[in-house]
């Protein structure tokens, strides 16, 4: 065990970690059952009664760790009120005119006068869980178990389109094309209309019908997936769990519960390769740096695949295993500078490795239940969990500090998406974070890279400057009157 600078990070070996049953992970939350999480923990194990002793040990380790989840009272800027409390304070003219529809938007405009972190509003749906998000420019795409993809522009409902079947488990955007991965094992392709950007036309399915027919002719193209069942190798026969674009945006990687990763060439929608990646369901795949692809599975491993060009095609070769543990790997993310790989697990921990030699650097401890999603923006890392919280971490010279904990959801946080922005006034930057949950809502957060005490000081300074700013042509003695009182104030210039 190693404690880094300032005692902010704790690193320990994964060899001594014990397997935590899926039932142990979920028994503390009554928001969703195993199927609602739609992250495969194991293809063979069922939920078991809670192991109180083991969970007590895990909870104790988290609470006593220097990286334990902070608790915030109502006055803390790091704590967000529930939507029921927030909604009653919003004027009626700020409520979306779409509030009568199945979706409604409740957003408060943020002030750029100082840096702060907090809840801006919610996009609420009356039925169905949110499983996938993708943000590009000023657009947000949301996928749910209603088989629909909704499009939001500037936090208002803009348009939507619906697939024939299969809840939407993953969304990836490549220019004018949108790829959606579904529970039925299909990847559907959509294109934004050039004449009307609110119209999204379905342009195909991966694999294409032509490819399926052509592949089905040759018996050698069939692989056995279950007893007495064979399918062509170019198609997934189980749910799509994750989608990721290559560094040059020319390839699309799809991970599935069928234990494979498939490689698609975007230009002609051709399946170039099928990788038998893991011994259990593949929960996540992400294209990283230096031609490397990372995959995480319910078998508890994180594997590295090296991409090599072969003529006009491409081939991926197994490189190494970064992690092998008892608990399932649920999420992977690479930071924008392509220097750090983050891995979330069903035990609530986040491991990370740096680019140089892919050496293990440490563990982030901020959650009591499974980490279900990850996102990065600049030097910020966001971790969403089944404990309904989102932790905001800041990387500084290899160390990570927990800036804040966002706690506005009432169900597990299933997906995250980030929209980076710059503050109009001043040099400080901030980003907009979207979080989708099994509580059927998408919440919008404004996140500052500044620590909480700096945000408070900036707010106090801004308010003081605003109150003290007075025109210089006022007399030295003047009065301010109100309905109920008269306040005299003496100024010397």
Image (spheres, rainbow, N blue to C red):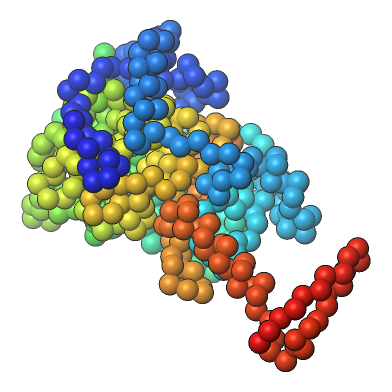
Place of residue 388 in the rendered image (x, y in percent of width and height, measured from the top left) = 50, 33
Q: Nearer the viewer, residue 491 or 213?
A: 491
* Residue 353 placement, left or right of 258: left
As drawn, the residue found furthest toward the top would be: 49
Query: Which residue is pictured at 53% across the width and 39% down the height?
Result: 72
Place of residue 94 in the rendered image (x, y in percent of width and height, measured from the top left) = 73, 58
Q: Nearer the viewer, residue 226 or 454?
A: 454
* Residue 388 placement, left or right of 476: left
Above or below residue 414? Residue 490 is: below
| Residue 450 visible (yes or no) | yes
| Residue 219 visible (yes or no) | no
Above or below residue 146? Residue 264 is: below
Place of residue 5 in the rendered image (x, y in percent of width and height, measured from the top left) = 23, 46
In which quadrant of the rendered view does residue 173 lie? bottom left
As drawn, the residue found furthest toward the bottom would be: 473
In which quadrant of the rendered view does residue 464 lie? bottom right
Place of residue 470 in the rendered image (x, y in percent of width and height, measured from the top left) = 69, 81
Query: Which residue is pictured at 64% across the width and 34% down the height?
Result: 127
Query: Which residue is pictured at 24% across the width and 25% down the height?
Result: 300
In the rendered view of the protein, which quadrant contains the N terminus?
top left
Above or below residue 263? Residue 140 is: below
* Residue 95 placement, left or right of 139: right
* Residue 73 placement, left or right of 260: right
Q: Nearer the viewer, residue 209 or 414?
A: 414
As drawn, the residue found furthest toward the right would be: 483
Above or below residue 464? Residue 226 is: above
In the rendered view of the protein, which quadrant contains the C terminus?
bottom right
Query: Which residue is pictured at 56% across the width and 62% down the height?
Result: 459
């Amino acid at each position: 065990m190693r404690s880094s600078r300032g005692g902010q990070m704790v690193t320990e070996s994964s060899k001594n970690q014990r397997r935590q049953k899926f039932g142990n992970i979920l028994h503390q939350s009554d928001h969703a059952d195993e199927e609602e999480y739609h992250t495969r923990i194991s293809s063979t194990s069922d939920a078991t009664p809670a192991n109180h002793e083991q969970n007590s040990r895990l909870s104790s380790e988290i609470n006593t760790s220097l990286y334990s989840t902070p608790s915030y009272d109502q006055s803390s800027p790091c704590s967000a009120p529930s939507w029921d409390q927030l909604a009653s304070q919003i004027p009626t003219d700020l409520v979306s005119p779409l509030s009568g529809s199945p979706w409604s938007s409740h957003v408060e405009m943020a002030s750029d006068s100082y840096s702060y972190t907090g809840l801006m509003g919610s996009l609420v749906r009356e039925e169905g869980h949110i499983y996938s998000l993708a943000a590009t420019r000023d657009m947000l795409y949301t996928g749910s178990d209603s088989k629909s993809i909704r499009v939001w522009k500037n936090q208002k409902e803009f348009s939507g389109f619906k697939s024939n079947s299969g809840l939407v488990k993953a969304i990836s955007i490549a220019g004018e094309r949108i790829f959606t991965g579904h529970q039925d094992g299909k990847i559907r392709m959509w294109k934004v209309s050039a004449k009307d950007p609110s119209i999204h036309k379905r342009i195909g399915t991966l694999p294409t019908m032509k490819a399926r027919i052509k592949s089905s002719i040759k018996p050698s193209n069939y692989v056995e997936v279950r007893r007495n069942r064979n399918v062509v190798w170019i198609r997934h026969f189980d749910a799509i769990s994750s989608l990721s674009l290559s560094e040059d945006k020319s390839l699309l990687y799809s991970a599935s519960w069928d234990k494979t990763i498939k490689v698609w060439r975007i230009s002609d929608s051709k399946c170039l390769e099928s990788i038998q990646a893991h011994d259990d369901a593949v929960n996540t795949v992400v294209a990283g740096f230096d031609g490397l692809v990372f995959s995480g599975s319910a078998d508890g491993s994180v594997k590295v695949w090296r991409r090599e060009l072969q003529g006009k095609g491409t081939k991926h070769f197994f490189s190494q295993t970064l992690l092998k543990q008892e608990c399932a790997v649920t999420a992977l993310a690479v930071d924008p500078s392509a220097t750090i790989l983050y891995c979330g697990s069903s035990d609530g921990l986040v491991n990370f490795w740096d680019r140089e030699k892919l050496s293990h650097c440490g563990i982030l401890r901020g959650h009591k239940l499974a980490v279900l999603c990850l996102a990065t923006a600049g030097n910020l890392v966001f971790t969403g969990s089944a404990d309904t919280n989102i932790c905001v971490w800041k990387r500084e010279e290899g160390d990570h500090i927990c800036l804040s904990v966002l706690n506005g959801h009432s169900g597990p946080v299933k997906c995250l998406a980030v929209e980076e922005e710059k503050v109009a006034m001043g040099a400080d930057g901030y980003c907009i974070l979207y979080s989708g949950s099994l509580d059927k809502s998408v919440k919008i957060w404004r996140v500052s890279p500044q620590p909480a005490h700096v945000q408070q000081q900036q707010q106090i300074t801004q308010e003081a400057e605003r109150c003290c700013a007075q025109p210089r042509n006022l007399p030295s003695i003047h009065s301010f009157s109100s309905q109920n009182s008269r306040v005299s104030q003496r100024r010397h210039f």
